[in-house]
Image: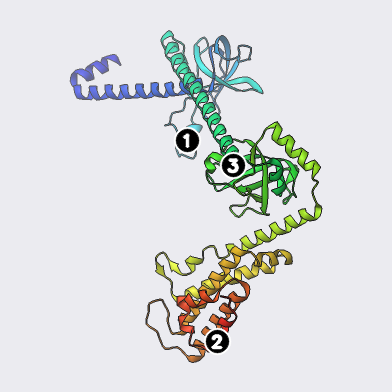
Amino acid sequence: MRFAALALAFLFPPLAALAQDEDDFERKQAEFKAARAWESAGWTGGDVVVAEVVSVPDDPGTNEAPPTIGLKIVRVIHGDAKLDRTKAVWSPAWPFEWGICGNDTRIKPWHAEKFSEMPKVGETYLFVAEYDARNPNPCLADGNTRSLLTDAFEKKALGWYDEGAKKGREFVAKKAADEKRVSEDSEAFWTSKMAGAKLEDLFAQGDFIGVGRICSGGGYPVAYFEITELLRGPRMHDYTHGSYFASMNTPKGGDLAFPDQQRKYLLVLAARGTECPVGGGGPFYEVLPGDRGVLPLTDANVAAARDWCRAHPADPAAEKEIVARCTGWSAARTAEGCFRWIDNSLKYGDKFRPLPDQDSALSAQIDRAEDFFKHCPEDARRRARLDKDYRATLAKALLLRAGVCALRSAGLEERGGTPQEIAPARADQLRRFAFEMIERALRETDVTRGRLVEEEDLQGLKADDRWAKALEGAGK
């Protein structure tokens, strides 16, 4: 082989140089992968052992099911020396680039290949031993770090390991410092909100008092909690195993308010809804005026809350009213959600849709809200229809449809188009639809006379006798 290489170098120098470059590249790539594997082991604190092979099976197995090798442990460089590592699964070295997808087409054929890294009895290896703490024997002899023992390789491998361990320690220290900083920032954020406030007054304002552990929330408009202790307030949702999860609005500066690290707070909140309007998340609460109501979980704060709750027992009738109010609020948000994409009823991007399409889309949204109310409990439906935000959204939809019907009654098929001839009966029918929408808006929402007069799309109805009658029923 050596003679062939010399002959190749003598006869074809460029080819020999290219072959040498390829060998150097493969050697550097293998060393890079080994260095990465050893650094990773140092970062995670993996066990490092030197072991002599004392037995090997007849069947080498496959890459997916590699053989179990009998070992005699010579040295334990890192790890618990008392663990039994006399048997080790001889895992193959990973031959592919790091980070490939688990369904890569190369993996399955490689798994099926015959295992080719079988050791010989009497050989001594250095490797990282991985194991299940519940059943450490056999351990796993990591193929990405495993190599025949030499002084030179041991020196390099342990150097890589120590470098990884150093980086791991630096990472842990930085993470702890960052968590301490954000924890202090969070406490300072909420402490500043409580400046000048009395705990007793705060407790009296809250519908809910309890201890909650944040599940997520940093930088989001809504924070999610697991309530670990409910001191006061009705449970508005039943969960299995006695758990209780809730959500709340995140005040401005929420990235400071709730660092996402499973931290606990004392919560004094106003109950808003039985469901969070953003992505579910159980009952929905809000902070009290001034962004108050989230307190650091100190023994003094919790003791004060418990004492106040004992001195002011909950009124069952008041708690029942809280649930009813919240049920109505959530019903209003669900009904309002029927109009969530109301502007898409008018346009495709920047272009207006044809007026008949606008009419049918708006009509479908209005009907969808009504269908929801048909299946809604009477008290929740009544409260939802009185909700200010829902009434504003419904008014927008009704007046939009009234305007579309008014434009269509003039023979228009699209905004800015040329009016077409339209049968008088059809024109009157469309105007009747428009006035029905206006009358409903006056009856069920807070639409004023001034708003009707200013609606550009309704200008064509002013010549109709029904216009004056509609204005009579409108407030200023």
Q: Report the residue at 59% width, 42% height from top.
A: 193
Quadrant showing the N terminus: top left
Disc 3: which residue: 193
Q: Position of residue 361 (x, y in %)?
A: 52, 71
In three-dimensional space, the C-alpha distance between marks 3 and 2, rounded to whole angstroms, equals: 55 Å
Q: Residues within 10 Å of mark 3 (few under 14, many from 20)?
A: some
* Amino acid type of the residue tagged 1 in the rendering: Ile
Q: Position of residue 368 (x, y in %)?
A: 60, 69
The circle on residue 351 is none
Quarter holding residue 230 = top right
Disc 2: which residue: 466
* Amino acid type of the residue tagged 3 in the rendering: Lys
* Placement of 91 over or under 466, stated as above or below: above
Q: Position of residue 173 (x, y in %)?
A: 52, 23
* Placement of 239 over or under 120, stated as above or below: below
- The tag earlier along the polypeptide, 1 or 2, is 1
User: Which residue is nearer to you in this view: 101 or 203?
Assistant: 203
User: Which residue is nearer to you in this view: 217 or 269?
Assistant: 269
User: Which residue is nearer to you in this view: 257 or 128?
Assistant: 257
Q: Is label 1 or label 3 in front?
A: 3
- The tag earlier along the polypeptide, 1 or 3, is 1
> Is residue 62 something that shows in the picture?
no
Disc 1: which residue: 107
Q: Secondary structure at mark 2?
A: helix
